[in-house]
Image (cartoon, rainbow, N blue to C red):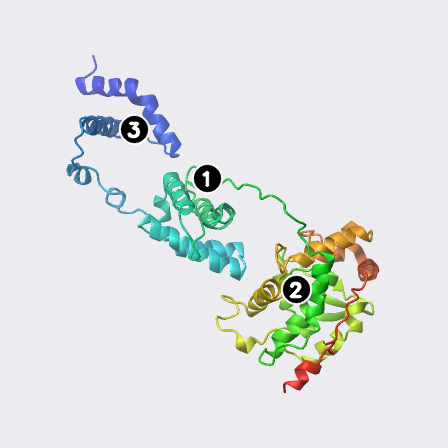
Amino acid sequence: MISFPEAVAQNRRYRYGNEAQAFLSARGLTLDHASYDLFLKAYVEAKILAEQQLQRYAALDYTPDERAAARFPSMDAANPDHAKAPALATFDQYADEAGLKASTRKRWRGLIEKFVIFLGYDDLTRVTRDDIVKWKKKLFTTKKANGKPIANITIRDAYIASIKATLEWLYEQDGMTGDSPAYEVKVRVKKKPKLREKGFTKPEAETILRATLRTPPEKMSIEMAAARRWVPWICAYTGARVNEITMLRPQDIDIESRIDVFRIRGDATKTDEYRNVPIHDHLIEQGFLEYVAYRGDQPLFYDPKRSRGGKDSNPHYQKVAERLAEWVRDDLMVIGVQPNHGWRHRFSSLARAVDMHVDIQNIIQGHVGKKTAGDYGDAWVEVAKREISKIPAYEIVSDERTSAAAPMEARQ
């Protein structure tokens, strides 16, 4: 004959066992027999207390239950040995291991900090799926400094992506059971209607290239004037990302198989893979190599001494790219297309128009991930030069045509 306490325990298991087990399983928890019975007793008591509270609400009694805080211990009180995971420290460890680019790291770290402020505590082991869903909902109603709402794609690819990546790393490192609370938290992004082509049109390209030949403002730095003069032309003939070009140094202009090439560094690319891109003859004809020689050992388009935030946190070459974008958009009034990405799309369109070999085009533009130019053997540069030469020279006429170095020398 079983004892009365055991009979009560059996009744609890029979009536609430499946429900309690589902609660534990959803959190990836497994208990031994003795601990399970203690948990089940507390679970049923909490369930009864919750029902009583709901009954008071139904009777329009919304008096706060002052006993609730004292009745249940906090997470830390219940588990004094609980190992915390401070958000920013955890993110830094993840970023170090993942090798995040400086710009991404800086931006994501700020978003993690905002998430901690929203939570009201700094311990990622306490974060629940409900916390992240509430964070997502708050972001939908948050306005930026300009009064506009945060775009869904920004919420998905920055705010949620940063915390999701950090939590997933934490769960992997600490052997935490179950999925990260950010698992399958999704943000729907409506596809924008396509109103125009992504690349510059021929008139837009000519407008920009013509403007590069004008005499720069007197107070503009030598490096920024050179960036206006050369970066659009280089992007037009390589389809490279603007940041890949604005960080070029004289030593990145090389000769391979008697062909002048840009050596796009791995730390400048999204794939972390370097690539050699032949220099189009029209750039050489305009005097680009003379400008390279003029710079000596200094970066082509920025002065490191002018950088204010340190190269890791605020890369100056990126600021140069941003100012070029502002110039194209605000001064030249080329709008409706990403100012610094329009050349990339235009190059792709021209490559198709001149029947450039698609594999070579992809390598020239850095579209191919881990497949590098070296895969094409010793003849790669000759082949790439042949293909890139298919892009016809832009015939731009200007009354203010300048030489490669003259504007720079005039300021010294």
Residue at image point 72% right, 79% down: 293
Amino acid carrying label 1: it is Val
Question: Relative to the observer, which residue lies in front, 210 or 263?
Answer: 210
In this rendering, does residue 263 appear at all? no
Amino acid carrying label 2: it is Arg
User: Which residue matches tag 2?
Assistant: 265
User: Which residue matches tag 3?
Assistant: 36
Q: Residues within 10 Å of mark 1 (few under 14, many from 20)?
A: some
Q: CA distance from mark 3 to mark 2?
A: 58 Å
Q: Earlier in the sequence, mark 3 or mark 1?
A: 3
Residue at image point 60% right, 43% down: 193
Q: Earlier in the sequence, mark 3 or mark 2?
A: 3
Task: Give the farthest residue toward the bottom.
Answer: 412
Secondary structure state at the residue bearing disc 1: loop
Amino acid carrying label 3: it is Tyr
Q: Could you say where residue 393 lies in the image, as x and y percent from the top left? A: 80, 64
User: Which residue matches tag 1?
Assistant: 185
Q: Could you say where residue 304 lies in the image, as x and y percent from the top left? A: 56, 75
User: Which marked residue is nearer to the observer: mark 1 or mark 2?
Assistant: 1
Are the residues tagged 3 and 1 within 8 Å (C-beta)? Answer: no
Secondary structure state at the residue bearing disc 3: helix
Tell me: 269 left or right of 116.
Answer: right
User: Which marked residue is nearer to the observer: mark 3 or mark 2?
Assistant: 2
Q: Residues within 10 Å of mark 3 (few under 14, many from 20)?
A: some
Q: CA distance from mark 3 to mark 1?
A: 30 Å
Q: Earlier in the sequence, mark 1 or mark 2?
A: 1
Location of residue 239 by image quarter: bottom right
Q: Could you say where residue 129 lies in the image, as x and y percent from the top left? A: 39, 39
Tell me: 313 left or right of 402.
Answer: left
Secondary structure state at the residue bearing disc 2: loop
Q: CA distance from mark 1 to mark 2?
A: 36 Å
